[in-house]
Image (spheres, coloured by chain):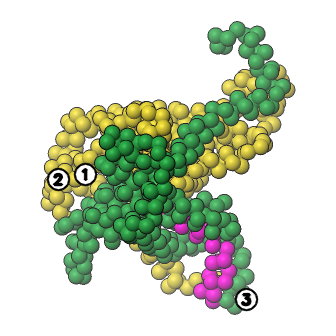
């Protein structure tokens, strides 16, 4: 027993037993309070800060209201270019991962034997947890001058793309690939075999079955995968820093304005761009039921 | 649908290639930590343990390991408490606003790390005026680590029957006694698995950390980022990267064995986001 006298503890326990509401309040207050006070408050504050300015003399944030930050982000050609480049990288990464993930997910779910299926799922899952930083760093190794890729490519006349936009796309596709494979695998796994057999018995060729039976059932899983690859790529800046050479993404601008440039309101305004794009994307796909597949 | 042998073989070959693509860069880091060549030319010129020795002797690395461990342990403890409480309330009770809270929990892992990072940075520095330190990193990490604990515990609660707890209450056990003797023992392995995942997640998180860490502090990932572009440190960075791989993969492997619940993708985020 604790330091609380037994009778008192018992009375408290009895009170909790009688009142489910009290029990719920006791459970919920701390975690819900944390999420609201720490996270939701922070997001709300971010939105507000985007409309403030920085005092040029003191370098402190001053609470003078202005829409200048937002206007600059939306109209300055520099930031328009960066936004478009970031969007292009995110879309390219998503498409590459989709093309790579579909056959492997199909193989694991429908072709491999039960034992292999388990092994392969773990094999895909493990690197998902290896540090994001280490994976980006690993690609710095692969792409290095005189590194593995040059050595592999030399006999067929290919050279490493070096550090730049292509390297960013390649590395991000690599990092987020398991996030695409797993939901699609789960989607294939849920398609009953009998459905595929019925389609085959009725004379459909494998490709027809895939197009007419499987693909429509898979759409929510594929979209669930794209939510990860797309939104995670949109916010990236570490990969751009490590293998991107001089490539700037939205995240790079955010980070530069928090650190070196010391303009938090502007950084806040820039960070609203990926938030808006992701919200818009989630809004478009919410009807497909993809959100339940996350 | 019957696939021809050829089609199956092609699919198998693609799978093997993709797995090769997934594992080669990670293996390359491991191999290069023993590569005698400073610039990681391929193929390796010789085998050396020099970099491993240097990494062990480096005071910077040692300090960073201690900070990382401290942050990971404290944020794991906080997220174990909060995640369990949250799972118990969302699974056992129906109340107004439950769906909102359900959505709130996954938000820290659904939004890109940059957003979480700058939102917390802005909250600490501009709004609250709190100086950044390792404690602000802990608060940030606990916010998203909570999700992995929550996911593991709620999955376990869904499979547990409430009957045992009712029986315990009928036999006269109080609320706390029932939790100690009936609920907790059933949750133990789920808590261990969730805790291990949270630890791994926190230990190598970089994006949110860069936004919330104090100026003089370094965690292991921050140390890598700071030394990445210094040519004479590159071999040691490789060794630290291998340590990060091992420290994050071993707990995950253990957690998988313990929980039996399949680990969902959304738990992994932030590794990203590493989340």
Is the magenta region chiefly helix, strand or loop? helix
Q: Which mark is residue A68?
A: none
Residue drawn where x is 63% and y is 78% of the image? A215
Q: Which residue is mark 2?
A: B231
C-alpha separation, residue under disc 1 versus residue under disc 2: 8 Å
Q: Which chain is green?
A: A
C-alpha separation, residue under disc 3 versus residue under disc 2: 64 Å
Question: Magenta includes A207?
Answer: yes
- Please state which of residues A96 and B41 is positioned toward the viewer in this rendering: A96
Q: Which residue is mark 3?
A: A202
Residue B10 image offset from top left, x and y in percent:
47, 80
Q: Report the chain holding disc 1.
A: B
Marks 1/3 in contact by CB < 8 Å: the verdict is no
Q: Report the chain holding disc 3.
A: A
Q: Which mark is residue B228?
A: 1
- Please state which of residues A179 and A92 is positioned toward the viewer in this rendering: A92
Q: Which residues are magenta?
A: A205-229
Residue drawn where x is 24% and y is 82% of the image? A156
Residue A265 image offset from top left, x and y in percent:
43, 49
Residue drawn where x is 19% and y is 59% of the image? B40
Q: Image quadrant for the N terminus of chain B?
A: bottom right
Local SS, label 2 = helix
Q: Which chain is yellow?
A: B
Residue A5 sits above or below residue B167 on the image: above
Q: Is residue A143 left or right of residue B249?
A: left
Residue A92 image offset from top left, x and y in percent:
44, 73
């Amino acid at each position: 027993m604790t330091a609380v006298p037994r009778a008192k503890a018992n009375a408290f326990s009895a009170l909790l037993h009688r009142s489910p509401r009290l029990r719920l309040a006791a459970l919920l207050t701390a975690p819900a309070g944390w999420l609201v006070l720490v996270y939701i408050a922070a997001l709300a504050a971010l939105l507000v800060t985007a409309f403030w300015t920085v005092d040029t003399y003191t370098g402190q944030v001053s609470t003078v209201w202005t829409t200048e930050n937002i206007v600059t982000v939306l109209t300055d050609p520099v930031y328009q270019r960066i936004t478009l480049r970031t969007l292009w990288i995110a879309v390219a990464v998503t498409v590459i991962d989709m093309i790579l993930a579909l056959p492997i997910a199909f193989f694991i779910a429908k072709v491999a034997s039960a034992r292999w299926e388990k092994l392969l799922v773990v094999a895909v899952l493990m690197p998902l947890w290896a540090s994001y930083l280490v994976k980006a760093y690993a690609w710095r190794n692969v792409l290095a001058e005189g590194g593995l890729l040059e050595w592999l490519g030399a006999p067929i006349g290919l050279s490493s793309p070096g550090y730049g936009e292509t390297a960013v796309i390649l590395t991000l596709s690599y990092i987020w690939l398991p996030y695409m494979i797993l939901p699609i695998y789960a989607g294939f796994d849920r398609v009953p075999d009998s459905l595929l057999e019925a389609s085959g018995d009725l004379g459909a060729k494998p490709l027809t079955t895939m197009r007419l039976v499987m693909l429509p059932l898979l759409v929510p899983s594929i979209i669930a995968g794209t939510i990860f690859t797309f939104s995670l790529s949109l916010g990236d800046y570490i990969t751009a820093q490590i293998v991107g050479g001089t490539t700037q993404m939205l995240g790079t601008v955010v980070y530069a304005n928090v650190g070196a440039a010391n303009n938090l309101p502007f950084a806040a305004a820039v960070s609203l761009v990926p938030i808006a794009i992701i919200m818009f994307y989630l809004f478009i796909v919410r009807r497909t039921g993809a959100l339940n597949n996350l | 649908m019957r696939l021809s042998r050829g089609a199956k073989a092609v699919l198998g070959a693609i799978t093997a290639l993709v797995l090769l693509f997934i594992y080669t860069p990670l293996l390359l880091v491991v191999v290069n930590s023993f590569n005698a060549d400073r610039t990681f030319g391929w193929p390796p010129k010789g085998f050396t343990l020099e970099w491993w020795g240097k990494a062990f002797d480096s005071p910077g690395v040692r300090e960073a390991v201690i900070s990382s461990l401290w942050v990971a342990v404290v944020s794991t403890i906080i997220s174990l408490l909060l995640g369990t409480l949250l799972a118990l309330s969302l699974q056992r009770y129906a109340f107004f606003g439950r769906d909102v809270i359900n959505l709130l929990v996954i938000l820290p892992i659904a939004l890109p790390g940059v957003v979480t990072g700058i939102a917390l940075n802005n909250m600490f520095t501009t709004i609250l005026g709190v100086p950044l330190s390792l404690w602000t990193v802990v608060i940030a990490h606990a916010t998203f680590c909570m999700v992995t604990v929550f996911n593991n515990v709620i999955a376990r609660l869904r499979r547990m029957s409430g009957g045992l707890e009712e029986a315990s209450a009928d036999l006269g056990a109080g609320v706390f006694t029932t939790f100690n003797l009936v609920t907790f023992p059933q949750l133990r392995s789920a808590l261990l698995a969730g805790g291990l995942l949270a630890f791994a997640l926190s230990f190598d998180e970089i994006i949110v950390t860069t936004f919330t860490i104090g100026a003089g502090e370094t965690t292991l990932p921050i140390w890598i980022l700071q030394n990445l572009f210094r040519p004479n440190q590159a071999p040691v960075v490789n060794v630290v990267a291998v340590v990060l791989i091992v420290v994050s993969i071993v707990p995950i492997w253990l957690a998988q064995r313990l929980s039996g619940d399949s680990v969902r993708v959304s738990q992994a985020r932030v590794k990203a986001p590493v989340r």
